[in-house]
């Protein structure tokens, strides 16, 4: 079902030393109790393993276990004394991960969020299963061509603003894309790719094409209407890229050698009306890729299909709203942009430390993210269907800044600019 062989070093789990006897799993919503032997529901099938932050663990069972509970725990249950138990509210001490059932097989993915946690798997039997580890953390931040833009206006539509967050896609194009295209007609062109699901709003694709380009990146944004600072961050980066002066080698390389094909706003209905997450039909456009039931999805898919042999990678920009995580990347672990995504994640996390925005243990959650069922999503569908490395990237300056402020936009520009530059420098596919 999943080909992770190249990325996950797999080993069978059968050694008795790895099993802890006596985890008592309570019903959902109640407290789980870890008990050493006495009082436990079962004396077999409880596996525990110390896990390292920023590694991903995939667990595979040959057969669906009769009973499966998984948890991450801050304590090592093996340190409990005979008869001793510890009750944990799962919100405090445990993090469960969705198991995926396909036929007789159950796999699940686990991404620890803190140092020194313990992965606990309770199956109720001592049958062997497999666990594989894939380190996410590459080590230290590198000094490779990182881009740190200056602050350049907010989105409140006043004097000195970069733009206005309330603009429809048409207004965004009229105010920010068309003036740039008129100034650099040899570099920027645009193509009409269709109407939205209501057959009312136009969808445009902008192409930034250097004369001697050697590779192509496909960029999309605003699948979700409220994630406004994300697509304006992409817009601000495209402005800075177009006007770059050769002083930043990464920017200069992209400007001279990389064709960017961009759909700045996919959910044009939302941008023109209510800035809601879904489109006019109430469909979440980043759950529509397998079905491609909506005009917006079909219009973009048609373009990706057209360029599929040339596209080195697809990056879809989301986020920029306060959530639980400062950054959230979803990509196919086995795809060739996997290392690029991790490298940028490391850098961004280091920047957050350096700027004092995040402290203590890393909370770089859910990298890489989606596992099975990923065909609903752009990132899974495009990788699985076209074999194109795809990333959905979310950053959340709303954790530290007011939404639509100049600082929020600056941070989005930095995050998304570095993803574009690093994908380009990796030269995943050149002509
Ligand atoms: Zn989103």
Image: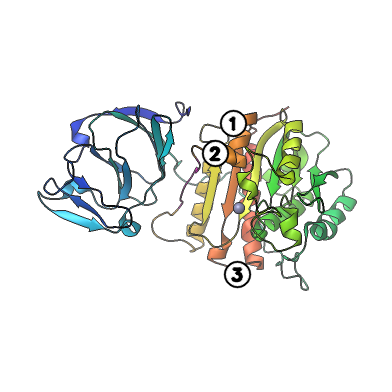
Instruction: State yes or no: Cβ of the residue under disc 1 lies below 8 Å from any atom of ligand 1.
Output: no
Q: Residues within 10 Å of mark 3 (few under 14, many from 20)?
A: some
Residue 256, by quadrant, is: top right
Residue 20, by quadrant, is: top left
**Secondary structure of the residue carrying numbered label 3:** loop
The magenta span reads 364-370
**Secondary structure of the residue carrying numbered label 2:** helix
Mark 1 and mark 2 residues within 8 Å of each other at the beta carbon: yes
If you read the primary sequence from the N terminus, does the residue marked by circle 2 or circle 3 appear first? Answer: 2
* Residue wearing tag 1: 384
In the displayed structure, 361 sits above or below 314; it is below
Q: Is residue 148 visible?
A: no
Residue nearest the observer in this picture, 152 or 388: 388
In the displayed structure, 376 sits above or below 409; it is above
The residue located at (65%, 46%) in the rendering is 316
The residue located at (73%, 46%) in the rendering is 296
**Mark carried by residue 374:** 2
* Residue wearing tag 3: 402
Q: CA distance from mark 2 to mark 3?
A: 32 Å
Q: Residues within 10 Å of mark 2 (few under 14, many from 20)?
A: many
Q: In the picture provided, is 185 more to the left or to the right than 141?
A: right
Q: In the picture provided, is 309 more to the left or to the right than 200?
A: left
In the displayed structure, 322 sits above or below 14; it is below
Where's the C terminus, which quadrant?
Answer: top right
């Amino acid at each position: 079902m999943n080909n992770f062989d190249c990325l996950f070093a797999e080993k069978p789990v059968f050694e008795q030393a790895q099993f802890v006897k006596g985890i008592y799993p309570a019903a959902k919503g109640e407290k789980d109790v870890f008990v050493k032997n006495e009082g436990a529901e079962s004396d077999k099938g409880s596996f525990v393993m110390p896990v390292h932050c920023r590694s991903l663990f995939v667990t595979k069972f040959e057969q669906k276990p009769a009973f499966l509970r998984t948890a991450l725990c801050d304590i090592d249950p093996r340190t409990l004394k005979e008869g001793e138990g510890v009750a944990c509210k799962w919100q405090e001490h445990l993090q469960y991960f969705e198991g995926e059932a396909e036929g007789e097989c159950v796999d699940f993915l686990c991404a620890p969020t803190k140092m020194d946690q313990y992965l606990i798997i309770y199956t109720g039997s001592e049958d062997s299963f497999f666990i594989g580890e894939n380190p996410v953390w590459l080590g230290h931040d590198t000094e490779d061509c990182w881009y740190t833009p200056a602050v350049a206006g907010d989105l409140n539509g006043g004097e000195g603003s970069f733009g206005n967050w309330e603009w429809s896609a048409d207004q965004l194009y009229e105010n920010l894309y068309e003036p740039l295209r008129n100034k650099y007609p040899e570099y920027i062109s645009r193509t009409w790719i269709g109407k939205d699901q209501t057959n009312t709003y136009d969808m445009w694709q902008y192409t930034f094409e250097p004369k001697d380009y050697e590779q192509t990146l496909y960029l999309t944004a605003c699948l979700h209407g409220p994630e406004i600072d994300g697509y304006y961050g992409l817009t601000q980066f495209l402005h800075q890229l177009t006007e770059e002066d050769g002083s930043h080698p990464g920017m200069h390389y992209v400007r001279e050698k990389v064709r960017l094909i961009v759909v700045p706003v996919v959910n044009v209905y939302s941008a023109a009306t209510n800035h809601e997450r879904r489109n006019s039909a109430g469909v979440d456009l980043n759950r529509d890729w397998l079905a491609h039931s909506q005009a917006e999805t079909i219009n973009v898919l048609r373009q990706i299909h057209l360029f599929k042999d040339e596209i080195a990678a697809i990056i879809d920009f989301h986020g920029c709203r306060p959530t639980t995580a400062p950054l959230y990347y979803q990509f196919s672990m086995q795809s060739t942009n996997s290392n690029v995504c991790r490298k940028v994640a490391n850098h961004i996390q280091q920047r957050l430390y350096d700027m004092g925005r995040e402290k203590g243990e890393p909370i770089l959650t859910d990298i890489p993210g989606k596992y099975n069922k990923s065909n609903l999503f752009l990132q899974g569908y495009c990788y699985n269907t076209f074999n194109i490395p795809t990333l959905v990237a979310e950053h959340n300056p709303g954790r530290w800044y007011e939404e639509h402020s100049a600082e929020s936009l600056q941070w989005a520009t930095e995050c998304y600019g570095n993803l574009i530059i690093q994908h380009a420098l990796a030269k995943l596919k050149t002509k």
